[in-house]
Amino acid sequence: MSSQSAQASRWQFWIDRGGTFTDIVARRPDGALITNKLLSDHPERYRDAAVAGIREMLGVPRDAPIPVEAIEAVKMGTTVATNALLERKGERTVLAITRGFGDALRIAYQNRPKLFVRRIVLPALVYERVVEIDERIGARGDIVRELDLGAAERDLRAVYDDGIRACAIVLVHGYRYPQHERAVEKLARAIGFEQVSVSHEVSPLMKLVSRGDTTVVDAYLSPILRRYVAQVEEDLCGGRQGSKTRLQFMQSSGGLTDAHRFQGKDAILSGPAGGVVGMVQVSRQAGFEKIIGFDMGGTSTDVTHYAGEYERAFDTEVAGVRLRAPMMRIHTVAAGGGSICSFDGSRFRVGPESAGANPGPASYRRGGPLTVTDCNIMVGKIDPALFPKVFGPSSDLPLDADAVGKKFEFVAKELAAATGHVRSAEEIAEGFLRIAVENMAHAIKHISVERGYDVTEYVMCCFGGAGGQHACAVADALGMTRVFIHPLAGVLSAYGMGLADVRALRQKAVEARLSTTALVGCQSVFVELANKARSEVEAQGIAAQRISLKHTLQLKYDGTDTTLEIPIAGSFSPDNDIVATLTNEFEQRYQTHYGFLMPARSLVVEAVAVEAIGTATTVEEAAPVFSPRGSDLARTKTNRVFTGGDWHAAPVYAREDLQPGDRLAGPAVIAEKNATTVVEPGWAATLTERDHLVLEREVPLERGHAIGT
């Protein structure tokens, strides 16, 4: 592994702090990469897994200071904000909104995703109190009602006196005419609110509900992130001032940013975004351009689609909250290695609850429930002897297979008593796995088949600690015939942190029909946004020559809500040709996404955006050098694996023993430090010159039903 434009004498740490495990990829001063994996939650041993992992890799005792002068950068993705939002454990927040709109975010759009559910349970509110502000600016900037700062101060001070320290300010039409929001912001800061988020800065786009929710989430989560950043800095630096170690966090949009610029609204998909970056970079180096990303971790599975450019969503809903912030288009299902497997008296269930890291699966020696990981132990796809010994009171014991067997025998007795069906423990485990596989396959259909993409033309890039155990089975459920596994697949999300660029995105609402006149107006807006975005990236130490700009328009049909992101050259000429080009590109993408066009409707430019992309460090994969083996590949051992309703003898190979050209026919198991890959019957695995595993179906699959959507 070689690196340019990096200090050769210092370490870098790339970290993915997930819900169950924290993965670390470290680049040593000599350029070599080493990895580490820890439980994210282990209060008996450490306060934070990321810092504990850095200590381990540097060989620093728990009570000794970390030599920060030896660390160039720490780049991290974290689930801290995501967990706080899911569990509603953010900062106590007040919503300041135009009088008469106090319930607007609660009422929202009155969507009914489950039409026939009679008892609708709304998600818990993120904000605790509402202060209605006497003011109103019209849609064209006219002052309908003057701002009453005296009443606003009285009400906000009462909230402050009750102990609330975060304030979200969302005024009608404030995204376009922000003078009243700025006045209330100044007032809130003067009162003493520690976190003040204003909608014209957080989400300067139309749509009150999503703009409001985004602003509230920013106020709700940013203090949590600030405290976490402060904790990491304290643990790293020990209070020492003047450290030159760069601490950066991954944003939901797929770009890194300085820790002190990391905001709540940009943190929701911090960890998974690193996986998307890593997936795309390593897949392209391997020669694949059409990719389905399959990231199966301990808590959930994230799936993504890539066909030449990163896909982003600008309107999303997470944990019942509508967000208008750029995020990688990632679809998540609650089917991870830690997903709880249960029998409710009539059927098997997998998830959505997860055992997490504490207590974890039944095999983790903490009295946890049965999970997908335990199912793989039961059927022989995971060998406790080959799994990291990080369990038990002293974190030095292997997985507990005996506890798993006893729990499955209990489920078998429950099943027989409730239904009369007699099933063996391994048959029950395989049944649970089949459910998990269908859940994950359905998630992939959602981001591919349902959007008009033929998934059989794609390669599945499989990563995450649990991905290799299910890759062949998920591919079979989708009709895919090729799976790509990078040597760092078990920690690819962490590796992606090191491959990511520093990015800053600026947006502004336009709301004009697409025409040469509208594009003339967009030119000055592009210049304004480009200057702001470039300045933010330069402020993080990126040289001007390493910064590129990406200009985009958000176009939609007049009278509709859904926009598509259309790229445009930064130095375009606003003439009829560019209008025709943009229209053609929009129609092609709209046809692909929705299957029809509306040619009678004109196009509207809802917003424009400029993204500054700063390449901080270029990491290039050098072809590895393999030592001559001197003999044929030898299996480590032979295990019994239960798959397809029967037991099979499956040779186990160590990944480090493989050489380019080695071909392993399934059933087989490939074991390595951070992951296990299961080659199912009918599949074969081949190692390439770049140390990549490529799994291909050799025997055509006999299918009893269509793949469907």
Image (cartoon, rainbow, N blue to C red):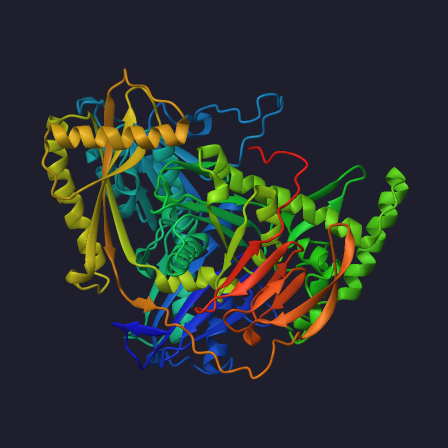
Where does residue 652 sit, x and y in percent of width and height?
67, 69
Picture quadrant of residue 401: bottom right
Where does residue 11 sit, x and y in percent of width and height?
37, 77
User: Seen in the image, is 426 located left or right of residue 181?
Assistant: right
Note whether 530 is above or below 41 in the view shown: above
Where does residue 34 sit, x and y in percent of width and height?
46, 75
Name the residue rendered at 50%, 71% in the picture.
660
Name the residue rendered at 41%, 54% in the picture.
288
Note whether 336 is above or below 159 in the view shown: below
Name the residue rendered at 63%, 71% in the picture.
653
**From this viewpoint, is residue 379 visible?**
yes
**From this viewpoint, is residue 229 visible?**
no
Number of marks in the image?
0
User: Seen in the image, is 586 located left or right of residue 459?
Assistant: left
Between 80 and 363, the one nearer to me in the picture:
363
Where does residue 321 sit, x and y in percent of width and height?
45, 37
User: Seen in the image, is 172 located left or right of residue 482?
Assistant: left
Between 300 and 133, the one nearer to me in the picture:
300
Identify the image quadrant of the C terminus: top right
Identify the image quadrant of the N terminus: bottom left
Picture quadrant of residue 690: bottom left
